[in-house]
Image (spheres, rainbow, N blue to C red):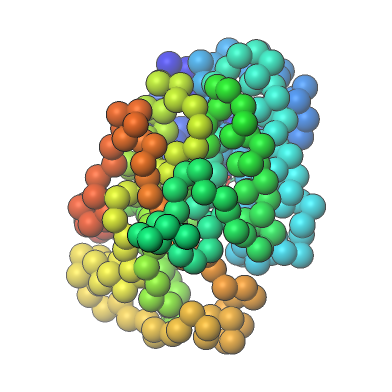
Amino acid sequence: MKILIFGKGFVGNRCASAWPDAVLSDVRVSNKEEALAEIKRVQPDAVLNAAGVKGKPNVDWCDTHQMETILGNTLEPIVLAQACQEVGVYLLHIGSGCIFYGDSPHPDKTWREDDFGNPRPTYSRAKWAADLVLSTLPNVAIARIRMPIDHVRNSGNLLQKLAAYPKVIDVENSITVVDDMVSVFRQLMEKKAPGIFHVTNPGTARHREILGLYKDLVDPNHSCEWISEEDLVVQGLATKKRSNNFLASTRLAEVGIAMRPVKEALRDTVEKYARAK
Ligand SMILES: NC(=O)c1ccc[n+]([C@@H]2O[C@H](COP(=O)([O-])OP(=O)(O)OC[C@H]3O[C@@H](n4cnc5c(N)ncnc54)[C@H](OP(=O)(O)O)[C@@H]3O)[C@@H](O)[C@H]2O)c1
């Protein structure tokens, strides 16, 4: 299967190195014609949209750079989808679980794929806006990932980020183990499965648990100061509270795709990270 990847960042590069047959595009998509020309050149069976604007040094940047954020996270997916629709090519767009804030209205507090998002920050709103419209299209899937954890060194890797912070909040979340994510993306594209998918490992993980594994398996001298969620903003480490949530991943099972339980996948990833030192 020939896969064309847009977005040469953390996820795009990681997928490209896992799939030797994939083409990682150099094109920065700003309109349908640019996307269409690249799709016609490569002739892929499926397109992965790993392009996006997350903000530098962090997502708070998006709240003061609204237009760049909207162009990168809402307009770019729409024009790419328009090009894919025109030539009948399946599109897998990477969404984010951070469109959900807090507990869901369901008794088990988890957010389902078809629940409506409740985001306030610009980044999450722009991602949710793309989900809202792309999810109406045939031959398109949205894979929502959350706090990717990997054994490969990258500044986008949650394990590496947490280990580097001197002050850390202890929150519980659904997370995405990148080895599993890469495999799920490929399976979704092979099946051309449409709709929204929560690509998160079953179960949840606390930051304290992740850093506990890091200390046990990677660096016995690791230490940090544990602070409250409120302190994150009070101490000026972030301008807005972050999204913390639990995602239910029900749709992957419907199409016959499974991810490892989070505890198993997490330990395996931290062990591999330690070995790759
Ligand atoms: N990593 C996470 O924690 C996370 C979590 C949930 C969802 N996601 C989503 O996953 C996707 C990939 O994220 P990532 O972590 O790989 O981000 P990343 O490392 O910032 O990579 C995104 C890449 O897209 C490029 N890009 C921006 N606008 C583009 C355009 N119009 N056409 C082509 N490329 C464009 C960026 O280039 P420049 O840097 O040069 O602008 C960057 O290389 C994004 O949609 C993100 O919202 C990521």
| Residue 226 drawn above or below residue 249 | below
**Rendered-image quadrant of the N terminus:** top left
Residue depicted at x 26% and y 78%: 221
- In depth, the one of 214 and 93 nearer the eye is 93
| Residue 183 drawn above or below residue 239 | above
Write down the quadrant of residue 168 in the picture.
bottom left
Residue depicted at x 65% and y 27%: 81
How many tags in the picture?
A: 0
Residue 222 image point, x, y percent: 30, 77
89 vs 30, left or right, is left
Residue depicted at x 55% and y 22%: 139
Residue 205 image point, x, y percent: 32, 63
**Rendered-image quadrant of the C terminus:** bottom left
Write down the quadrant of residue 157 in the picture.
bottom left
- In depth, the one of 95 and 64 nearer the eye is 95
116 vs 106, left or right, is right
- In depth, the one of 237 and 103 nearer the eye is 103
| Residue 20 drawn above or below residue 102 | above
Residue 34 image point, x, y percent: 75, 25
Residue 132 seen from this side = yes
Residue 148 seen from this side = no
Residue 149 image point, x, y percent: 37, 54
Residue depicted at x 33% and y 42%: 179
166 vs 266, left or right, is right
